[in-house]
Amino acid sequence: METLSENACFGGVQGVYSHASTACACDMTFGLFLPAEAQDGPVPVLWYLSGLTCTHENAMVKAGAQCWAAEHGIALVFPDTSPRGDAVADDEAFDLGQGAGFYVNATQAPWAPHFQMYDYITRELSTVIFNNFAIDETRESITGHSMGGHGALTIAMTHPGRFASVSAFSPICHPTKSDWGRKQLSAYLGTDESKWAEYDATLLMQDKGFDGPVLIDMGTTDQFLDLLMPEALAKAMATRRQQAIFRMQPGYDHSYFFVSTFMEDHIAFHAEALYGLNT
Amino acid sequence: METLSENACFGGVQGVYSHASTACACDMTFGLFLPAEAQDGPVPVLWYLSGLTCTHENAMVKAGAQCWAAEHGIALVFPDTSPRGDAVADDEAFDLGQGAGFYVNATQAPWAPHFQMYDYITRELSTVIFNNFAIDETRESITGHSMGGHGALTIAMTHPGRFASVSAFSPICHPTKSDWGRKQLSAYLGTDESKWAEYDATLLMQDKGFDGPVLIDMGTTDQFLDLLMPEALAKAMATRRQQAIFRMQPGYDHSYFFVSTFMEDHIAFHAEALYGLNT
């Protein structure tokens, strides 16, 4: 693992690191915020999965999350959204290939050799951060924005018992029925739609639910509402009687101005779940 | 004036606007955050002047300032740092020409026709925002980062009675004696150094001081300390018995991770001065 930068930030350290990834078969870069409390021992961690076109950097500089993570003594991990590099397959479209990994394990050419973001996040990068930093591996929560909200919800529901809580900002809620999903799932997983279900938050909510609290924020004037399909997830959560808070925020759009506005709430929500685990 | 974007943000609106500038003889773009309170009447305003290479956008997306401005009901203005465009003079160096206006009125070729940032900020953009938005022109404060900290301090001290308070993050403190200053002041103002004094915060502090509270934050591991020369300004403030808080923050550098960490303090500092004026 190589340290690319470390900056003092809200009493802690915002670092950027790279490492040779086995899952993605390329070098991967991630951001990690450690609060001051990490100097004294392991701290809980909140994963933040970013959206289409993002790298590890967008949320790290635009979401204003370190302020609240510092307040609650929680680490933040900002993974990249896909494998990268000249040797990695790509597509001209912004919503397929590099910057658009969709947090799946691809099975189809040309994507399969590198696009293993589900394993990368849930196994490989987890091990890297637990082995190299003062992070308490028994206290994880997960959040994300847009494609990353989809990633957070699907990863949380397919790892029962692992995450204390899950939240999402404007998540892609029902990718098997949306143009933000069908295109990518068919490219990465092939045309057999039965293989897509484990990567659809609405279907997972119908089938499994989440064994902890869920918080979703969505802007009422989000320009991508038709693609995000929040109504599908809202219905599935209510039908299941899932412990959850689902908020439509009046006048907000899909941008980081929206994300940063509600970041304080999300981190406080996760802190309550993370600190509640062992108390 | 043209609206380029408006996003809901912390209960208010983060807008980006452009207008034809007379002072700079080109189109200029600026960011403006209006808190929810502006829907009911004029609100106080805090100017944020950015540093070298920045546009109106950097602080708007990276400083985390809207959160605290919303809390205190204060507007934020994010001007650009120079005139821009193919017709505007430029230099290959990052620290001269476009992106590096230094908040002066240039008198020398090829800069004089467009590089009138001092007048642009203090007269023209002021008029634009007072005429077009619910901003109380009797309640202004000013801050900035690096080159923008220099701009904030020099503009505040050369407009006695106008600004309720001034603060700066890692400001260029003594440009007439630093390589961040001598190069630009000689290019923009010519080699007669007597013309430079009105753009040097340390010399202005020695000569005039500021008729209100001053707050300066500087990182002890700022990579540009030798160019910023905080010791010169600290000495001048103490010698003058200026009402001021001068903080060297341990372990912090020159980045927006530093700026965002102390933004809450700065906006609370300005809010106290702005609301104290008429109460």
Image (tube, coloured by chain):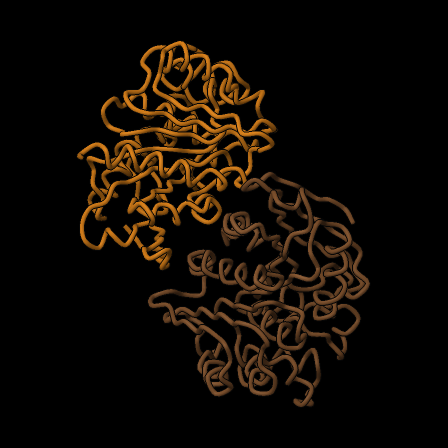
Chain colours: A orange, B brown
Q: Is residue A210 found left or right of B48 in the rendered image?
A: left
| Image quarter (top left, top right, bottom left or bottom right) of the C terminus of chain A | top left
Above or below residue B4? Residue A274 is above
Q: Is residue B213 above or below residue B132?
A: below
Q: Quadrant of residue B201?
A: bottom right
Can you give x and y, in whole percent of width and height, for residue B42 in the image? 68, 51
As drawn, the residue found furthest toward the front would be B279
Q: Nearer the viewer, residue A263 or B244?
A: B244
Name which residue lies at 28% across and 20% down: A211
Left or right position of A270 against B206: left
Q: How many marks?
A: 0
Q: From the top left corner, tell me how far across and down residue A141 is, in percent.
A: 30, 33
Percent x, y of residue A159? 27, 23
Residue B271 sits in quarter? bottom right
- The residue positioned 49% from the left and 77% from the top of the image is B227
Q: Nearer the viewer, residue B36 or A106?
A: B36
The x and y percentages for residue A123 are: 26, 32
